[in-house]
Image (tube, rainbow, N blue to C red):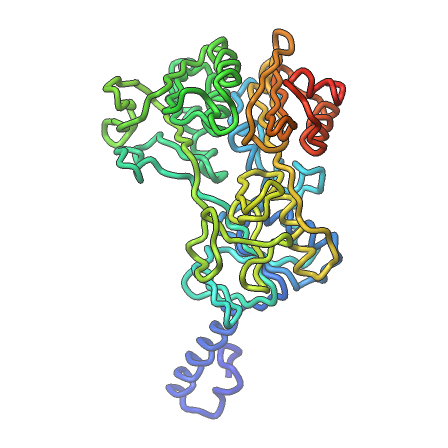
Amino acid sequence: LPPLFPACCRGRSSEGRAHRAEQCMFRCCARRMQLNFEYLIVGGGNAAGYACREFVAQGVGAGRVGVVMAEPVLPYERPALTKAYLHPPTAKVRARLPGFHTCVGGGGERQLKEWYEEHGIELVKGKAMSVDFKSKCVTVGDDQQCTYGKLILATGCSALRVSKFGVKGDDLANVFYLREESDAAALVQALEALPEGKGQAVIVGGGYIGLECAAALVGWGIDTTMVLPEANVMPRLFNAELGKWMEDQYMARGIKIAKGEIAAEFTGTDGILSGVTLKSGQSLPCNISVVGVGSTPNVDYCQGLKMDSGGFAVDEFMRTSEPEVFAIGDICAFPSQYGGLTRCEHVDHARKSAAQAVKAAMDVKTEPYKYLPYFYSRIFEYTPEPIAFNFFGDQSGDCHVSARGDKSVGAVWLKDGKVVGALLMGSPGPSPEDAKKLSQLATETPAALDAAAAFSVVGL
C-alpha cells in the first residue's frame, strides 16, 4: 500500500482500507490536537514575554514551556503602541516590529522567533476558550487541547468600548481603540491617508491613552482636540494643579481640551467617521478618533478562581486559589503593601510579577512580592522639548505640589505627616538618578510638611 495508508489498514478491501485510513488519520489529528507542557502560559503580551525570559534564566529545558497566543505577533513591549509607534514621519525614532519585541524595554534580549526556537519554547496560536482545572487542560480555539503541570495566566486587558455605555457609532471606520499592534498599524495607515496637515482628530479620554495619542497625533500636523468628562487630565493621579500644568503644555503645542464633556455619538457618512457629537450638543468634525476610556481584564475564559477587583486574586507568589495556577500582569489582584489586594495595569508590574510567578512555579526560593507602584510616561519625544514624568508609591494621601522652575513641577503625597508617594514631571523630565531618589522617598516614607521639604530629604 502507498504511504498514505497506515499499517493498520493493510490486508483490507479497498473500501475498508479507505474507511479505516480515515478513522486512523482522524485519531492521529486528534492526538496532535493535544499538546502537553510542564509549564503553560496563556497570553502572548508583555507579561508572557518576560515570563519566558525568566524560564530561560532559570534554566528550563527545551519542550517544557508552551505559550498560547491570540495575537498573530510575538510578545512585544506594548507601551510603544501609543508612543513611538505613532510618531510622525519626520521623527527620528518610529517604533516598528521586530524592533520592540520583549524584552528590549527591560534591558534584555529582543526575543524573536529564533529565540523561542533556540530555547525550545513552543508557541501555540489561538485564543484560550476555557480552562479545566480537574484535567489540567486549556482549550484553545475550537478543538486544540493543551495540558499543563503549572499554568500561568497572562491575558491582560481589552479596551473598554464606549458603546457599552450607549454611545453610538464607535464601529465606524477611523474610530480606533488601541490595544494591539494591529490597532496601532491601522491608525498609522489612516493617518498616512490624510492630506498632509489637513486632518482633524478627536481624542476621547484624558488618561494615559488619551494624553499619549494626542501628543503623537498633533505631530502629524493634525488639528487635535481632547474630550474628557473629568475636571483635569489624568484624574486618577493628578490633582487640579498638576493637571493644569500638563494641560498648559498641551495647549501651548496647539492641542485643544474640552473638559467636563462626554462623547455621545460618533457620526459618519457611508460608514466612515465624520464627527463626534458631545453630550452638550456640540459637534466636533473629525477624520480620526481615538478612544481611551479604560480597560477590562480578560478573565472570562477561566471560571472558578477567587476574584478581587475584577481580576484573579493571588498571594505574594502570584498563586491563585488553584495551587497549580498563577496569574500575572493586569489580570491579577495581588497583596498591596498599603493593605488589601490591588490590581495594577502597568508594564513594570507585568515584568516583575512574571518573574515572581515563574520562580514560584519552578519552586525557586524567592521573597514575597512587595511591589512599589511605579507609573511613567514620555510624550512629545519627537520634539526638541519632550515631557516625561515618574511617579512612585501611593497616591491616596494629600497631594502637595512644588514648582521647580519654568519647565518642571514636583509633588508628594502625604499621609499622617509622612511621604507615601512622589512625582517629578517636566521637560526633559526626571533623570535616572532623580527616579532613584523618588523611589527612595516612597520607600523610606520620611516625615515632611510639604513637597519642598520632602524633596530636600533626598537631595532633589
Pick the front one: 42 or 71: 42
Seen as rendered, the residue at the extreme top is 406
Q: Provide residue 177's location: percent of width, then percent of height.
A: 41, 35
Q: Position of residue 83 (x, y in %)?
A: 54, 27
Identified at 60% across, 63% down, the residue is 150
In terms of depth relative to the viewer, which is nearer, 169 or 89? 169
- Outermost residue, bottom side: 11
Compared across the picture, whether 268 is left or right of 340 comes to left
Left or right placement of residue 445 versus residue 70 in this view: right
Displayed quadrant of residue 284: top left
Q: Residue at x 48, y 40 (%)?
A: 180
**Picture mark count:** 0
Give the quadrant of residue 221.
top left
Pick out the residue farthest to the front. 416
Residue 326 in picture, x, y percent from top left = 58, 57
- Could you tell me if residue 37 is visible in this image? yes
Height in image: 18 above or below 90? below
- Front residue of 227 and 340: 340
Identify the residue shown where x is 59% and y is 18%. 387
Quadrant occupied by the C terminus? top right
> Is any atom of residue 384 visible in this view?
no
